[in-house]
Image (cartoon, helix red, strand yellow):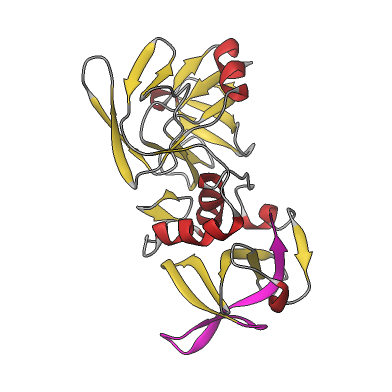
């Protein structure tokens, strides 16, 4: 088995082996993965964090050994806590990194990829946060534009938003809304929910197509056009700007 790590800020994960293919997710700096298939220009990979699979350009990652991969997988995880920041290598070259980037083998402001050492002096997240901090973390992404497959404050989709917020708080969610809906404990009524729980929404065919984070006082923060706050009721999400419901409520889940 081959293994890799993202050594660039944000790399698209594609549905097929083409730059014109749909971006189904993103690989952030420091994220590791198994290389399932490697061709001349593209590799099919499986991300360590959520087992998500897709194709990545061979020029946009670096190979790592199985030993490096295994050691890092068992190490304590550290993530960058700034909206945008940078790391510097030994030649003092800058690489920008977005919120939620992994910091491999982080220690004393230094991190390591193979033999390359980097310096990072920004804020670092490494501990599990309490449930009441999930909503506060979600506000970090407020007004981020919607981007299909996105995972950063510069473009993010609904399930990327919930996954990244939970990641920054020390918890793992799957990548897609319909997969996230299989996690956690079902709540019967909105009244039972707490800030930080997830609400899922379906289409006319009954397929889960949207997810958001419940806030206090019957509100929800979610990515729809942008990361925004709307009202949540038993029917779904009510958008006060256009005075109508935009999403039909299917299920509420308590994740922690």
Give the residue at x 22% y 15%: 91
Give the residue at x 48% y 16%: 63
Say if 72 sits above or below 218 in the image.
above
40 or 253: nearer the eye?
253
Say if 45 sits above or below 183 in the image.
above
Q: Residue furthest bottom?
A: 243
Choose top left, top right, bottom left or bottom right for residue 140. Answer: bottom left
Q: Is residue 36 visible?
A: no
Q: Position of residue 161 (x, y in %)?
A: 50, 55
Quadrant for the C terminus, please: bottom right
The kind of secondary structure the magenta stretch mainly shows is strand
Magenta-span inclusion, residue 240? yes
Quadrant for the N terminus, please: top right
Q: Position of residue 13 (x, y in %)?
A: 49, 39
Q: How many marks?
A: 0
Q: Position of residue 116 (x, y in %)?
A: 36, 13
182 or 55: nearer the eye?
182
Q: State left or right for residue 230 relative to residue 180.
A: left
Magenta-span inclusion, residue 22? no
Magenta residues, as a range?
A: 233-256
Q: State left or right for residue 26 relative to residue 192.
A: left
Say if 246 sits above or below 32 in the image.
below
Q: State left or right for residue 199 relative to residue 102.
A: right
Say if 113 sits above or below 185 in the image.
above
Choose top left, top right, bottom left or bottom right for residue 112. Answer: top left
159 or 187: nearer the eye?
187
Q: Is residue 149 visible?
A: yes
153 or 131: nearer the eye?
131
Q: Position of residue 17 (x, y in %)?
A: 50, 34
């Amino acid at each position: 088995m081959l293994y890799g790590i993202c050594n660039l800020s944000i790399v698209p994960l594609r549905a097929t082996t083409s730059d014109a293919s749909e971006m189904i997710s993103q690989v952030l700096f420091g994220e590791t993965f198994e290389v399932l298939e490697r061709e001349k220009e593209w590799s099919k990979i499986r991300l360590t964090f959520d087992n998500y699979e897709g194709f990545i350009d061979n020029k946009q990652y670096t190979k790592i050994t199985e030993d490096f991969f295994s050691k890092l997988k068992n190490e304590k995880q550290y993530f960058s806590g700034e909206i945008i920041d940078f790391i510097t290598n030994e030649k003092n070259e800058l690489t920008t990194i977005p919120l939620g980037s992994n910091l491999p083998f982080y220690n004393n402001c230094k991190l390591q990829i193979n033999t390359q050492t980097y310096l990072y002096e920004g804020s670092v997240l490494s501990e599990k946060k309490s449930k009441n901090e999930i909503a506060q973390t979600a506000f970090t992404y407020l007004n981020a534009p919607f981007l299909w497959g996105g995972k950063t404050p510069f473009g993010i989709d609904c399930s990327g938003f919930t996954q990244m917020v939970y990641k920054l708080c020390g918890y793992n969610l799957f990548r897609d809304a319909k997969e996230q809906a299989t996690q956690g404990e079902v709540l019967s009524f909105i009244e039972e929910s707490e800030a930080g729980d997830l609400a899922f929404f379906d289409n006319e065919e009954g397929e889960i197509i949207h997810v958001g984070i419940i806030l206090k006082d019957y509100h929800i923060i979610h990515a729809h056009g942008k990361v925004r706050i709307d009202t949540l009721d038993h029917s779904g999400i009510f958008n006060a700007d256009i005075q109508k419901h935009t999403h039909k409520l299917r299920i509420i889940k308590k994740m922690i």
